[in-house]
Image (cartoon, rainbow, N blue to C red):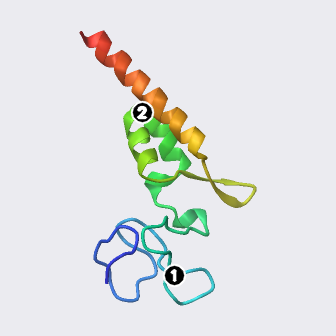
């Protein structure tokens, strides 16, 4: 059996993927979580969100290596919890991050010349 989120091999009947940490069953049901092919995975709880999609990783990436945050934001969403509800950052926030990343990279490379 393969994890529907990271496509790594996992045990049959697993509840949580040992590779990406995604929950494989929906809350209160015994059936695997399903999302239409090609769409974003559906998370119902912050504990189901992979570590590289959480806000703390976004902040750490910005502080240490901003291109990582830009690359990850291009490939999906970042999640955070607000008033007990799981939220994602909007497209405009992601594009601002990408533009800032490009600006910082251009500045670094121009300083090296």
Mark sitting on residue 64: none
Mark 1 touching mark 2, by CB under 8 A?
A: no
> Residue 35: percent from the left, percent from the top?
50, 75
Q: Is residue 18 left or right of residue 43?
A: left
x 39%, y 74%: residue: 4
> If the image is split into quadrants, where does the N terminus sit?
bottom left
Q: Earlier in the sequence, mark 1 or mark 2?
A: 1
Q: Secondary structure under badge 2?
A: helix
Alpha-carbon span between mark 1 and mark 2: 33 Å
Picture quadrant of residue 67: top left
The residue carrying pointer 1 sits among few (fewer than 14), some (14 to 19) or many (20 or more) residues within 10 Å by Cα, namely some
Q: Secondary structure under badge 1?
A: loop
Q: Which is more toward the observer, 102 or 27?
A: 102
x 46%, y 46%: residue: 73
x 56%, y 80%: residue: 26
> If the image is split into quadrants, where does the C terminus sit?
top left
Q: Which is more toward the observer, 60 or 112?
A: 112
Residue with the most extreme left position: 113
Q: Is residue 62 left or right of residue 26?
A: left
Q: Is residue 83 left or right of residue 65?
A: right
Residue at which label 2 appears: 66
The count of marks equals 2
Q: Is residue 85 above or below residue 5?
A: above
> Residue 75: percent from the left, percent from the top?
41, 51
The residue carrying pointer 2 sits among few (fewer than 14), some (14 to 19) or many (20 or more) residues within 10 Å by Cα, namely many
> Residue 49: percent from the left, percent from the top?
51, 62
> Residue 21: percent from the left, percent from the top?
43, 67
Q: Is residue 86 above or below residue 60?
A: below
x 53%, y 41%: residue: 94
Q: Which is more toward the observer, 64 or 99?
A: 99
Mark sitting on residue 25: 1
């Amino acid at each position: 059996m393969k994890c529907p989120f990271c496509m790594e091999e996992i045990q049959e009947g697993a509840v949580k993927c040992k590779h990406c940490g995604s929950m494989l069953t929906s809350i209160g049901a015994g059936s695997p979580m399903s999302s239409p092919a090609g769409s974003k995975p559906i998370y119902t709880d912050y504990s189901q969100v992979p570590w590289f999609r959480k806000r703390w990783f976004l902040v750490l990436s910005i502080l240490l290596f901003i291109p990582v945050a830009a690359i990850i934001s291009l490939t999906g969403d970042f999640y955070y919890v607000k008033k007990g509800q799981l939220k994602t950052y909007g497209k405009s926030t992601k594009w601002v991050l990408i533009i800032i990343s490009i600006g910082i990279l251009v500045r670094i490379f121009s300083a090296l010349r």
